[in-house]
Image (tube, rainbow, N blue to C red):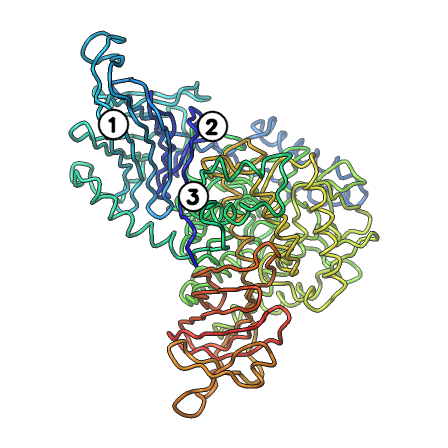
Amino acid sequence: MDLAVNGLVSTTRTDDWEAALVSGNGRQGALCYGGPTGVRITVSHERLFLPLNPPLDPPPTARILDELRALLAAGEYRRAAARVVEFAAEQDPGYAETRWVDPLVGAATLTCTPTAAGPATGYRRSTDFDTGLVRQYWRLTEGEADAAEGEAGAAGDDIEVAGGEVEVAAFVSRPHDVLVVQLAGPTGWRVGLGPLDEEPPVPMEIRVAPDGLGLRVDFPTATAGQVTGYTVTGRLVDGRLLLLRTTVDGVPSPGPDLADLPADFDALLAAHVAVHGDLVGRVRLDLGAAPAARSATTEELLRPFRPGAATAGTPNSAALVERLFAAGRYAIVSACGDLPPTLLGVWSGTYRPAWSGAYTVNGNLPAALAALAVTGTPELTTPLFDLLDSVTDDLRDNARRLYGTGGILVPAHLTSHGRQNHFGPVWCQTFWTAGAAWLARFYHDHWCHTGDRAFLRYRALPFLRRAAEFYLDYVTIGPDGRARFAPSYSPENTPANTDSQACLDATMDVAAVADLLRNLLAETAALGEPDRAEPRWRALLAALPPYRIAPTGELAEWIAPDLVDNHAHRHASHLYPLWYEPDPAFTADPALRRAAALTVRRRLAWWRGAESDEMGYGLAQLGLAAAGLGLAEEAYQTVLLMAGRYWRPNLVSTHNRDAIFNVDVCGGLPAVVAAMLLRSSLVPADGPAETARPADEETRPTDEGTRLGVERTRPTGGGARPGVRPEPAVRLGLLPAVPRAWPRGQVTGLLARGPVTVTRLTWTSTEVEAFLLSPADRVVTVELPGNTPVRVELAAGRTYRLRSRR
């Protein structure tokens, strides 16, 4: 089976940074655009947050919590949201208007202008996902051309030009922390560095170096905790090799000085590829696309999926999904540095990005990170944990001042600080309290996908405990013994029978807290270290209200019975129980699964319409739930909708249809595809284990194995190896939601919880073959659609092969 092309070629020339090709090392980003008359590269840094608004103390709404709860209980939802804003402004005039967090901004733009501006033909641009190398290239026609300004002769004078290929190639090195640019072709080059070509919203003191290869910017109005300035430094070697680095004040680069770097493009690229290529190359997806489709430009691949074009059954569907799976992973990997990806990843070409280009926790950030673990790069979630550690004091202040509790409260938006400063009478974000519980799932999954017990003990458990401490204090218990969440918030939806996003008992709150408490109990059990708070965790878990099925049959978005669902909405937060490891309530109750399936179909019907436009990652939420329910065709429809609406030829996703540079779907689409191919969860080990043999030993199918559709094996040189019963065991679902459009395919390197690596998973219309590898002795229950689950023993470090009929 041929491997999919891991890159892109585009014919679109653009002067728009939002349509640029991207390269990045997580710390620094490069947006590459322009064309034969001048190539531009806008550089950025993951910590370059423009000091727009000084952080304020979160409003002390704990003082009016009883009043807010009374308003909500009386159905005065809109008044409750407005009361928070009124009270906050009374306490601090800075809250009189909506406060945005500090935005992620571009640092500078490098312009590379060929000195011979002659006729150019055959323009192409490309990105190699395996290397991170971005190229723009064209052919310069031999003959007379205009001299560029500043060159020999006056601008516009005719000069003789030798024809040939012209190329600008660039990448951002991980090991050397530097942008490397190579200028090639039968022309000289004029290079210069300058600030962004727009008016900044705050004072900036800008100084450009005399040689045009350096830039210093100071922010005189910055306050404590904000960025005070940054520096862009360049080194030009022989007029052809340029090294450029952006540093933010107080954050030194881990790379060597520019003067100490080798003046060798190929050597610098090889060092980068050794690191970047390993991360990107851990997973490969092959859906059997035609070779001609794989070699198509992105414009050719995207064209049939544009509005008005039929998508289902399009011959290039498999090739497009293959390429977007790879492109999305490339963008997210390239945006993971010391910090996680923002809404913009690590890139920005403006001083005014939408929603400040922030970390938006109530959906965007989880979507961007959703595929990291399952596609074999769990270490790239570590920047999330580092970010949260850096703002722990702010998160504690949020909990204390907003609700009078212990523990932590994660705001919906954050960048340079973690204080809850962004809210309003409509977007009543202080009522959203599920952030810490949701992010706790990423801590738990990091342990599940790495088996790192030191991380579990020293990072995951402390965060989960702090998160649980908040809910133990915040949640009230009603006369019926049921937990109540008031205030509550289901991002960013309004019940159909109210006029406010403020609410009671959002399903997401209950689901995320239940997930948190179950994971706490699992983690303390795994370490054999009971916690004094465990009885309180169990009591709250038992008190959580059951999920509600709406009168119309769907899973209700609000457990409060007087709130009516609104399906015409981009978020699907109440499907949280199906995004990760399935909530036991859904595995135990077919009625809940039917209700959730109906919810998926109702929301998907809205997404198919013209009204649905913004926030493409809502389709990822829907797709993950569909895959979790085994709804293969519905999951596939979410992939096609994401593919056809939310990508430009540069293959960086957008937030709205063909609008707003945004990396959420770059994480969301690969996550949904992976969920359609692999499902995993940690479970207690019980019952006798079946035995599979290592792939390097002879395979002998048993009669019973043939009946079950799974080829089990016995040793070739003696009795079966004694069963190994480590904790935790793993339940592994192979191909849980593969659509009819993918009758054959192969994926390598997916990582299941345990951890267990599916080193290769291959399927045809009649057969499935999987190779499993575990770093520890482990019992795995393998599930295949239509087959009886089979329990197998995995021995540490040995690859096992499973085969099944479909």
Quadrant of the snapshot with the N terminus: bottom left
Using a 10 Å C-alpha cutoff, classify the residue at mark 1 as few (fewer than 14 neighbours), some (14 to 19) or many (20 or more).
Answer: some
Q: Nearer the viewer, mark 2 or mark 1?
A: 1
Q: Quadrant of residue 804?
A: bottom right
Where's residue 495, x and y in %?
76, 42
Which residue is tagged 1?
A: 164
Q: Earlier in the sequence, mark 3 or mark 2?
A: 2
Where's residue 760, x and y in %?
44, 65
Where's residue 33, x and y in %?
38, 28
Task: Locate residue 379 relative to residue 738 in the image: left or right.
Answer: left
Q: Earlier in the sequence, mark 2 or mark 1?
A: 2
Q: Quadrant of residue 536?
A: bottom right
Q: Amino acid at mark 1?
A: Gly
Q: Which mark is residue 52?
A: 2
Whole-Å distance between the Cαs marked 3 and 2?
45 Å
In this rendering, the answer to whether 11 lies above or below 506 is above
**Residue 221 visible in the snapshot:** yes
Q: Which mark is residue 295?
A: 3
Q: Quadrant of residue 580?
A: bottom right
Contact flag, marks 1 and 3 (Cβ < 8 Å): no
Viewer-proximal residue among 731 and 749: 749
Q: Circle 1 sits in a helix, a strand or a loop, which is it?
A: strand
Quadrant of the snapshot with the C terminus: bottom right
Task: Locate residue 573 relative to residue 268 in the image: left or right.
Answer: right
Where's residue 334, x and y in %?
39, 44
Q: Circle 2 sits in a helix, a strand or a loop, which is it?
A: loop
In this rendering, the answer to whether 525 lies above or below 673 is below
Q: Nearer the viewer, mark 3 or mark 2?
A: 3
Whole-Å distance between the Cαs marked 1 and 3?
24 Å
